[in-house]
Amino acid sequence: MSTSKSGVDRRQFFRIGSGAAAAGILGARVSSTEDPPSGPKSRVVLIRERHVLDDEGRLDEALLHDMVNRAVQSLFEADSPSEAWKRVVSPGDVVGIKTNVWRHLPTPPALEDAIRSEVVAAGVEPENLAVDDRGVRTNPVFQRATALINVRPMRTHNWSGLGTCLKNMIMFVPRPPEYHGDSCAPLGAMWKLPELEGKVRLNILVMLTPQFHGVGPHSFSKDYVWPYRGLIVGIDPVAVDATGARIIRAKRDLYFGEPSPVSPPAHHIELADSRYGLGHAAPEAIDLVRFGWQEDLLI
Amino acid sequence: MRLQSLVCGLLVAGTTVGCGMSPRGRGVGVTDPGFPERVGDWTAEGVTETYDTETIYDYIDGHAEVYLAYGMRRCLSQRYLAPDGKGEIVVDLFEMASPADAFGVFSHDRAGDEIAVGQGGVYRHGWLSFWEGSWNGSIYASTDGEDAEHAVIAIGEAVSKELPGGGEVPTLVNRLPQQGLDPASVCFLRSVQILNAHVWVGSDNLFELGPETEAVVGAYDLDGLAIHLLVIRYPDDASAARAEARVRDSAATSAAGLPAMTVGRAGDLVAAMIGPDIGEAGDALIEQALGGAR
């Protein structure tokens, strides 16, 4: 075709791409998860309890404590919760519990207290234990921490797609924006920093009232959280986040009535697997154990 | 549905919505907008907070990058409390790099009901978003109810009138052919990460978007086929040619990782139709978008 009436020469147009780029969880275009998983599967425990929240959203703190204990016990396939917690931490450890203080959807203080009490019961000296979020870089306990427990609620995030356990550790870096490029694709790299590598013993993604969509600069609307009443617990942060991401995706599809991948895609989860080797993102590489309330499980 | 515009003095829930302006929020600079002390029964609480490009991360964790991608200069924030103290409205005014950028950040998320606030506004679920001049406004109510909804809109109207206006919707928007276009999908942008939130074009900055470029993307339904059209204006013809060459080179080396797209260039403009190959119809769409380019 020659130059058209508009003066634009269509012969100059060119077509690229097959459009067949792999669509992973949440629509991310990462091809590596097409590869079969290698090594043992990552065990992830999803526990839910209908009555952990009442109809007004009030939390049953004792039941929540019981939930995290049962999840940790199952995760380690231990005979009791106390035995399981002793596999998470040892009396000689200095333990930092990395929480999340985002005002709209913080880590429940009751959950922080439950973890704290179990860590102390496992033999860790109270002075060797701290709970923190924004202050982890200057917190003296975190500065000498030998073990970290990572606990945060799941939510959508305007830059990374999802606020995940992987992303929760960003407060350990001096300049978080340095990890914001390409929808936070490099987040897995920070887990290789000395402050983190080999120290994170447990990841807990709080799914009590996860947020599946955001509006406005504060990225929050109470219309987009729902009482899922669950916790996702694992050692592998990638597997934990990938499991949570599948639930969020299912909820979005259900709510919006059409395929509704998180935007931007939370590809930092898959890249934490394929690029940084932090764990498994593919469902077939995850041994998902489901406990408790099964209604509207979404996974 | 188009919501009816409210004006100061409107009767809301049996009370008069007064919009008493005050020096609140003024004093930081000569062009600082003011916030009303009171709107109906809602009263301003505390001081007007100001955030810059560093402190904004502490204030709006998770969304700061969106505003920074549009050249945010600062954010002024004011809270309002309900008479019973149980409800809160948060007003955030973002000063952007230009009116085009203020429109851009508004266009990034404009699902909702159109409303006549500022130079363009939408309202949804207790949240009002609008733009006026180089400013983008966000007004969010943490509580449900008609009173809160009306207060949000009334505050928006009062605040927007205090903002220095000027500027228009970027002319590049007019390059998107109208047939099949979803008007609510049109987004003006300068960042590949913003673009990827609307349509994925790959992890690399394939089109070399940046502060010196301007781009517009829109979603189309063409006989049941969903496609996106992207139009980018570069600072000059040579920059556009370099970007076009980069796209060609990337296609040759990593086409499997890229979405399917048809690309064309004319002068300082590059247009890409992203989606399934629709043959002549796609070519025509690009041709229209590039038509008359210098």
Image: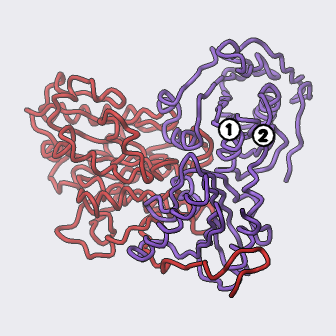
Chain colours: A red, B purple
Percent x, y of residue B107: 69, 50
- In front here: A6 or B208? A6
Percent x, y of residue B263: 59, 73
Which residue is depicted at the point 86% across and 29% down? B13
Q: Which residue is mark 1?
A: B98
Where B224 falls versus B170 (above or below)?
Answer: below
Mark 2 to mark 1: distance in Å? 8 Å
Q: Secondary structure at mark 1?
A: loop
The amino acid on which the numbered mark 2 sits, given as a three-letter code, is Gly
Q: Is residue B134 left or right of residue A89?
A: right
How many residues crowd mark 2 within 10 Å: few (<14), some (14–19), many (20+)?
A: some
Q: Secondary structure at mark 2?
A: loop
Sequence-wise, the earlier of marks 2 and 1 is: 1
Which residue is depicted at the point 90% across and 31% down? B7
Percent x, y of residue A198: 16, 46
Q: Which residue is mark 2?
A: B167
For this orientation, the residue located farthest to the bottom is A1
| Residue B75 lies in quadrant | top right
Q: Is residue A55 visible?
A: no
Tag 1, which chain? B
Q: Is residue B204 left or right of residue B175?
A: left
- In front here: B226 or B240? B240
Q: Is residue A45 left or right of residue A146?
A: right
- In front here: A207 or B125? B125
Tag 2, which chain? B
Query: Mark 2 and 1 residues: CB-CB less than 8 Å, in contact?
Result: yes
Quadrant in the picture for the C terminus of chain B: bottom right
